[in-house]
Amino acid sequence: MKRNSVVFSVWIVVIGALLFTTGLGRVHLFDWDEINFAESAREMLVSGDYLDVQINFETFWEKPPLFIWMQAFSMKLFGVNEFAARFPNALAGIITLLVLFFIGKRLRDESFGLLWSLLYACSFLPFFYFKSGIIDPWFNLFIFLGIYFMIRYTLPEHNDRQGLHAVLSAFFLGLATLTKGPVGFLIFALCFFVFLVLRRFRIDFRWKHVLAFIGVFAIVGGLWFILQIANGHLSIIQDFIVYQIRLFRTEDAGHGGFPFYHFIILFFGVFPASIFAVATFRKGVLRIEENTGMAHFFRWMMITLWVVLILFSIVQTKIVHYSSMCYFPITFLAAWYIDKWTNGDVKIGKEIIIPLMIVGIVVGLAAFAIPFIDAWKSLLIPYIGDEFTRGNLQAMSSWIGFEWLFGVVLIAAVILFAVFLRNRPKAIFTLLAGCLVFIYGGVFFITPQVEKYSQHAAIEFYQSKRGEDCYILPLHKSYAHYFYSDRQPQNTNTDREFLQRGAIDKPAYFVLRNQKREVDGFVSQTVDAMKLYDKNGFAFYARYPK
């Protein structure tokens, strides 16, 4: 490794650590996904059962255990808290930036590798996900590496390491399967099939490589599934498969959406990279690429982008992070276009400047306005029909007073990009630096205040019940009460009939959305329930043993 690469790598690790590890514990874990996985990790520590993923100390068959093992190990090191739950993804962020740097360096040079890493780190959702406690950053990294080594395997020129690349591809795809299930392999398989169709099924391969690929993938990806079957838990695997099918066919997990949902999410969520990536969709754009290895990689990234987009547009369940695998191809395509622009091979015109300005200014204005919500919410509340939302807005945040500046920084960044357009390195540096300041400032300062309007009151209540021998039952789907009340195995009863009307042996607490229909229904069915208080859209009730 050259000295420059070592220096760049050290800087990526140091800056990545500063960006992704600071402030991880400043805001509560968000219901559902963040708390869901963290709670499974906590229950592993409490129960000592590291093979079965559990929620409420019952088998939870929706996800395999690899990411939850990471969180459990992190909790062993840092305690059961938000920082520990999110720390694995901070590591994923650092590793991802290093991976992009070295792949970019191999494709072109160190400058391209740095540009790709910067674009990934400075785009909205990719940055935000590295500060989260959800599965997808590791899941996507494993899929990407599986695809990358298959790209290396299928290079047109002579490749004397095909066997190694096949094994590495299978290994990382196996880890992806062990992280979130077979959809990781499905994404790869669809991409590979499209590639074969475009190549008219002409590809140089050896059968021993195919067998090695199958063997490694089966061992790594199937390890947990094999152990479950060996322990007589075949039903867990069956339930897992049924759940995966249900996600595809129905609007499961409480999330539906329109067909172009993910197009919109990616266009705004991967800003500013998405704006430049769109410019690569023009017919014949690849003609200016003389590097065959880069052109080969470009085609694979374009295939990956469209396969993931189309696949999850067909899937009925619509969740923001389902299309997060697209962050890799989008940021690559953006880096490729910007690299060509800085070298004078392409131009940046109104088709890029106008959407860049519009999105940047609109998002910047929204961020500018949010810190003033307490000043103008009284004007908004009378026009909101939903009682729960009105209650949420009754919360009070503790704004420092300078948070609006982050919106101004983003607006200034897109404007200065247009002003500095002739000085290309200065223009792109200004844009990316401004986006990074905006994202980091937003996550560090704005998100903790916004959380107070959504779930803070409920979590505050759950935390107050830590150490108390009691039952807690939200009347809406939630995982927060498990994690934040430190639920123990002896308090796992969730039988609503028993808790509302039965002869309970310890206090039972109920958390409701403070909506008239829900509250009236609960009160009529639970005549001896005592109202404790209501706060910020939630109502809290209790029953005590007689």
Image (cartoon, helix red, strand yellow):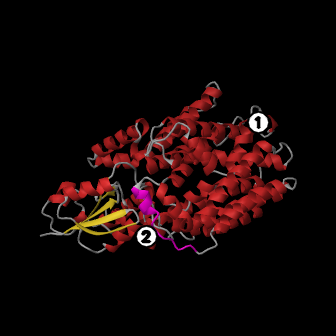
**Label 1 secondary element:** helix
- Callout 2, which amino acid? Asn
Which residue is painted at 35% across and 70% down in the image? 461
Q: Residue at x 70, y 46 (%)?
A: 275
Does the stretch in magenta take in 388? yes
Q: Outermost residue, top direction?
A: 200
Q: Residue 286 carries which label?
A: 1
> In terms of image quadrants, where is residue 40?
bottom left
Stretch of the chain drawn in magenta: 387-399
Q: Which of 294 and 338 is in front in this view?
A: 338
Eye-nearest disc, 1 or 2: 2
The residue that disc 2 covers is: 81
Horizontally, residue 349 falls left or right of residue 318, namely right
Give coordinates of residue 232: x percent, y percent: 26, 47
Is residue 523 toward the left or the right of residue 256 in the image? left
Q: In which quarter of the image is residue 435?
A: bottom right
CA–CA distance in space, label 1 to label 2: 48 Å
* Callout 1–callout 2 Cβ contact below 8 Å: no
Percent position of residue 150, x then y: 60, 40
Label 1 or label 2, whichever comes before in sequence order: 2
Query: Which quadrant of the figure contains the C terminus?
Result: bottom left
Which quarter of the image is occupied by the N terminus?
bottom right
What type is the residue that disc 1 sits on? Leu
Question: 228 and 363: which one is in front?
Answer: 363
